[in-house]
């Protein structure tokens, strides 16, 4: 497998995420979607779905990022595959798992990034949201004076009344919250997709200054 440096970071990311991808990401060679287009068409995959996969391949294909703190690290690298349809629309695989987890990482009918096990659970509204969350995890881990892990029902006890959502992660099942000196990441994807409430996890990054809280990202930036 050939490795390549990142020369063209996808647009639409914050400065923090662009810096993260350029500093810590690499590219590997992946199979072109066009190589399988006719094969998929012959098996009833709509042209528009294959076009979506090709666009995903062009934008994200082969990108390897540091592992996520949850989901056993997330996809090993981005590569579209295995389109699946239902009455709700079409999904395709976002990339192979790093380890043997009981779900697949998928791109949803509206471009969401999520996991599919017992049910489809979108984690972020877009792939960009997943990448932003990875970048924020890396940033917060470097600058926090303390990191506290909370699981299961105890997650509901975290007081977020004075916190604001971190909009750039475009969270759905997984969300980030910003306070005066701390960031809170709440991961509910496995709990929802596997019907396993005890699987909810929150990480609280505390003791952050303004740089730690935002990393150069302005209010409302995305």
Image (spheres, rainbow, N blue to C red):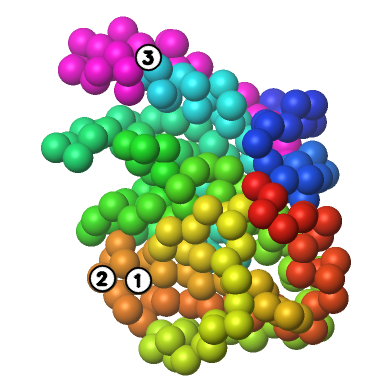
Badge 1: residue crowd in 10 Å (few <14, some 14–19, many ≥20)? some
Query: Label 3: how many residues lie within 10 Å, few (<14), some (14-19) or many (20+)?
Result: few
Under circle 2, the secondary element is loop
Mark 3 / mark 2, whichever is N-terminal: 3
Q: Secondary structure at mark 3?
A: helix
Left or right: where 211 falls relative to 21: right
Where are the magenta residues, as a range?
A: 24-49
Image x and y of residue 36, in percent:
37, 14
- Residue depicted at 77% across the width and 63% down the height: 214
Against 31, is 9 above or below?
below
**Nearer mark to the viewer, of 1 and 3:** 1
| Residue shown at the point (39%, 30%) measured from the top left | 81
Front residue of 96/54: it is 54
Give yes or no for residue 48 being in the magenta stretch. yes
Percent from the top left, x then y, of residue 34? 44, 11
Are the residues tagged 1 and 2 within 8 Å (C-beta)?
A: yes
- Residue receiving disc 2: 195
106 on left or right of 131: left
Residue matched to label 3: 36
How much space separates mark 1 and mark 3, taking CA atoms?
A: 34 Å
Residue 98, visible in the rendered structure: no
Classify residue 194 by image quadrant.
Answer: bottom left
Task: Using the rendered view, name the quadrant where residue 111 is placed.
Answer: top left
């Amino acid at each position: 497998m050939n490795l390549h440096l990142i020369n063209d970071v996808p647009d639409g990311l914050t400065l923090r995420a662009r810096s993260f991808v350029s500093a810590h990401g690499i590219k590997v060679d992946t199979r072109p979607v066009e190589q399988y287009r006719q094969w998929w068409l012959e098996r009833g995959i709509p042209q528009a779905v294959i076009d979506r996969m090709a666009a995903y391949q062009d934008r994200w294909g082969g990108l390897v990022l540091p592992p996520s703190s949850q989901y056993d690290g997330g996809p090993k690298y981005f590569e579209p595959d295995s389109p699946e349809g239902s009455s709700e629309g079409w999904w395709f695989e976002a990339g192979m798992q790093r380890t043997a987890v009981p779900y697949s990482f998928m791109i949803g009918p509206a471009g969401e990034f999520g996991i599919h096990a017992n049910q489809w659970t979108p984690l972020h509204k877009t792939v960009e949201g997943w990448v932003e969350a990875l970048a924020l995890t890396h940033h917060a881990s470097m600058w926090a004076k303390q990191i506290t892990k909370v699981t299961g029902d105890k997650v509901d006890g975290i007081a977020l009344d004075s916190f604001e959502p971190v909009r750039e992660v475009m969270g759905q099942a997984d969300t980030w919250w910003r306070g005066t000196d701390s960031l809170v990441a709440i991961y509910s994807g496995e709990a929802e997709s596997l019907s396993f409430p005890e699987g909810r996890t929150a990480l609280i990054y505390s003791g952050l200054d303004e740089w730690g809280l935002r990393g150069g990202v302005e209010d409302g930036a995305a």
